[in-house]
């Protein structure tokens, strides 16, 4: 055995790495099943109906915390981006009476997307840090731009901008800008919440 190791050190190192990978992979797989935390199915269904803007207008740091609060009895009418359509869908799901949108949290608006006036951008990265869904591309002292398909129109990037070069413009509608929705099991999930930006800034 020792002679085999001496004659083929690279091969034995590869075998050792594969063995360790298989062992730790099995342990992680077992732990994922054994210690799996069961979520609230009602909360998951509510979260699927929310618009996933992660804007915080409802008073919670994101759509997931708001869905959990609704599951525990909070009002269903605190989401301006979702508007009346979301309120009706939540009412149908929970078998409760729909309520008018709570104006204290904002008013329903047409879908918007952030737009950076790139010739005025100074590359400070503050909007990147504020974006809860990482929809802004750029680097320090380099022009930034918005990935329109990822932007939720939450407006959290507006206030941090020191040169006020970000606008919210109506999202283009129509056949030319329509996308076939992904199946539920393949749709992107935005579990990032608005408070993540604060934590990143603190770090």
Image: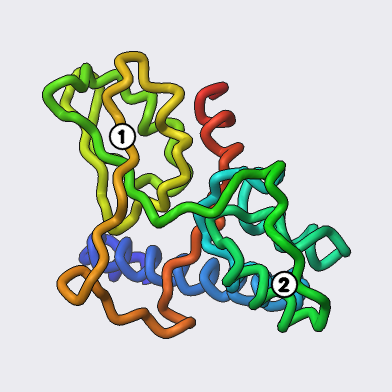
Residue at image point 21% right, 17% down: 122
Left or right of residue 83: residue 177: left
Separation (CA) of disc 2 from disc 1: 43 Å
Residue at image point 47% right, 74% down: 22
Image quadrant in which you'd find residue 95: bottom right
Left or right of residue 155: residue 84: right
| Mark 2 surroundings within 10 Å by alpha-carbon count, few (fewer than 14), some (14 through 19), many (20 or more) | few
Give the secondary structure at mark 2. Answer: loop
Q: Nearer the viewer, residue 185 or 11?
A: 185
The picture places residue 57, in percent across and down from the top left corner, at: 62, 44
| Residue 38 visible in the shown view | no
The quadrant in which the N terminus is found is bottom left
- Tell me the residue that label 2 is attached to: 36
Residue 167's disc is 1
Left or right of residue 163: residue 105: right
Q: Residue furthest left?
A: 119
The picture places residue 63, in percent across and down from the top left corner, at: 62, 56
The picture places residue 142, in percent across and down from the top left corner, at: 17, 24
Image quadrant in which you'd find residue 155: top left
| 2 and 1 marks in contact (CB < 8 Å) | no
Q: Is residue 31 above or below residue 75?
A: below
Q: Is residue 114 above or below residue 28?
A: above
């Amino acid at each position: 055995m020792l002679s085999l190791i001496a004659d083929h050190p690279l091969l034995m190192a590869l075998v050792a790495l594969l063995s360790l990978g298989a062992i730790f992979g099995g342990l992680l797989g077992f732990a994922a099943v054994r210690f799996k935390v069961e979520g609230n199915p009602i909360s998951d269904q509510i979260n699927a109906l929310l618009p996933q803007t992660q804007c915080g207008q409802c008073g919670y740091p994101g759509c997931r915390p708001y869905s959990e609060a609704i599951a525990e009895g909070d009002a269903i009418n605190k989401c301006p981006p979702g508007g009346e359509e979301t309120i009706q869908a939540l009412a149908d799901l929970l078998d409760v009476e729909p309520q008018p949108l709570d104006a204290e949290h904002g008013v329903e608006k047409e879908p918007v997307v952030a737009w950076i006036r790139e010739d005025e951008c100074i590359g400070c990265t503050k909007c990147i840090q504020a974006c809860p869904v990482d929809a802004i591309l750029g680097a320090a002292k380099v022009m930034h731009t918005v990935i329109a398909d990822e932007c939720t129109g939450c407006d959290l990037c507006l206030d941090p901008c020191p040169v006020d070069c970000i606008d919210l413009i109506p999202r283009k509608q129509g056949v030319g800008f329509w996308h076939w929705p992904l199946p539920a099991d393949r749709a992107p999930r935005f579990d990032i919440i608005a408070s993540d930006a604060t934590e990143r800034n603190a770090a």
